[in-house]
């Protein structure tokens, strides 16, 4: 079988041996992040739809898993924002029913978590890995370049609501870019937001591969360590990935 929607398994820094599912192909996303390794977002949208046929995804998945491969997580992510896919609940439910030995993870940019329906659809996932890169609107616009209608305030409230409703693990990722979200003001606001959200873990990330914009640079190791210590003053389970 030719797999159009699966990729990997790949070795992941956080998820070990991970089989990926690309639910939203062709770079359809609600953000156009300057650091994205997938390149510039071609279709910037908040529209939810069945971007890839759910039946095709499940057929490919059932075929691949029929050999009982050694996988730690089945990860819903890929080249676009997976919560834009209207069939995400059906896919997660099917995996839980047909392949209960595998754990599921969802990589999300948090932009749709203000929607109670989306939060409910993610409830059967074992792990949710949301991201939050900025709190002030100017920095958010510079780094994440959102579709109209998205604000950091709405994203943070969605993450707080997710934590109150969701029973699984939440690992919050913050992507740090020098001179953008690493100012004293922004770091204090990010730490405060993480304290409100109450994730199980906080992961600090920086550029590891080429991003979308050439001006995005990695954060020096000493700065990453300093910021990690700053977050650890108020939060538990903070690490650099």
Image (cartoon, helix red, strand yellow):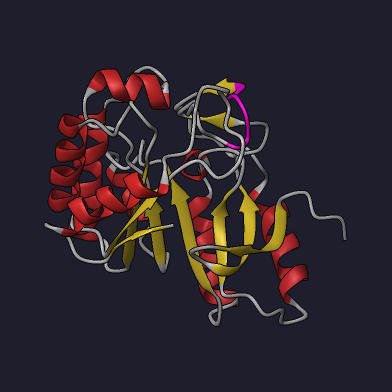
Q: In this view, does 128 lie to the left or right of 191?
A: right
Q: Is residue 198 above or below residue 45?
A: below
User: Visible in this render: residue 75?
Assistant: yes
Q: Where is residue 113 in the image (x, y as percent from the top left)?
A: 32, 43
Residue name at image x 15 percent, y 30 percent: 185
**Where on the picture, by quarter, is residue 152?**
top left
Q: Is residue 31 above or below residue 158?
A: above
Q: Where does the C terminus fall, quadrant-wise?
A: bottom left
Assess whether residue 233 is covered by the magenta stretch. no
Which of 240/6 is in front?
240
Q: Position of residue 69 (x, y in %)?
A: 72, 79
Which of 170/102 is in front?
170
| Number of callouts | 0
Q: Position of residue 197 (x, y in %)?
A: 18, 51
Which of 151/191 is in front?
191
Q: In this view, does 29 lie above or below 208?
A: above
Q: Where is residue 65 in the image (x, y as percent from the top left)?
A: 71, 74
Residue name at image x 86 percent, y 55 percent: 2
Assess whether residue 41 is covered by the magenta stretch. yes
User: Visible in this render: residue 146?
Assistant: no
Q: Is residue 50 above or below residue 17?
A: above
Which of 57/238 is in front?
238
The majority secondary structure of the magenta stretch comes to: loop
Residue at the outermost front position: 222
Residue name at image x 35 percent, y 19 percent: 141
Q: Where does the N terminus fall, quadrant-wise?
A: bottom right
**Where on the picture, by quarter, is residue 200?**
bottom left
Q: Which region of the structure is painted magenta?
A: 37-42
Residue name at image x 67 percent, y 62 percent: 10
């Amino acid at each position: 079988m030719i797999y159009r929607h699966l990729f990997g398994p790949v070795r992941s820094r956080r998820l070990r041996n991970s089989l990926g599912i690309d639910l939203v192909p062709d770079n359809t996303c609600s953000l156009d992040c300057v650091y994205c390794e997938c390149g510039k977002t071609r279709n910037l949208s908040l529209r939810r739809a069945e971007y890839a046929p759910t039946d095709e995804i499940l057929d490919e998945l059932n075929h691949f898993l029929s050999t009982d491969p050694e996988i730690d997580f089945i990860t819903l992510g890929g080249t676009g924002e997976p919560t834009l896919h209207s069939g995400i609940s059906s896919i997660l439910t099917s995996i839980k029913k047909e392949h209960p030995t595998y754990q599921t993870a969802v990589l999300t940019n948090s932009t749709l978590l203000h929607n109670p329906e989306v939060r409910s659809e993610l409830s059967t996932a074992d792990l949710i890995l949301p991201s939050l890169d900025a709190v002030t609107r100017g920095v958010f616009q510079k780094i994440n370049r959102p579709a109209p209608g998205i604000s950091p305030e709405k994203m943070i409230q969605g993450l707080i609501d997710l934590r109150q409703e969701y029973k699984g693990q939440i690992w919050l990722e913050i992507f740090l870019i020098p001179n953008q979200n690493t100012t004293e003001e922004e770091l204090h606001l990010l730490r405060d937001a993480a304290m409100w959200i109450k994730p199980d873990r906080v992961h600090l990330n920086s550029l590891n591969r080429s991003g979308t914009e050439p001006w995005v640079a990695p954060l020096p190791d000493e700065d990453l360590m300093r910021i990690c210590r700053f977050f650890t003053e108020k939060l538990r389970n903070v690490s650099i990935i």
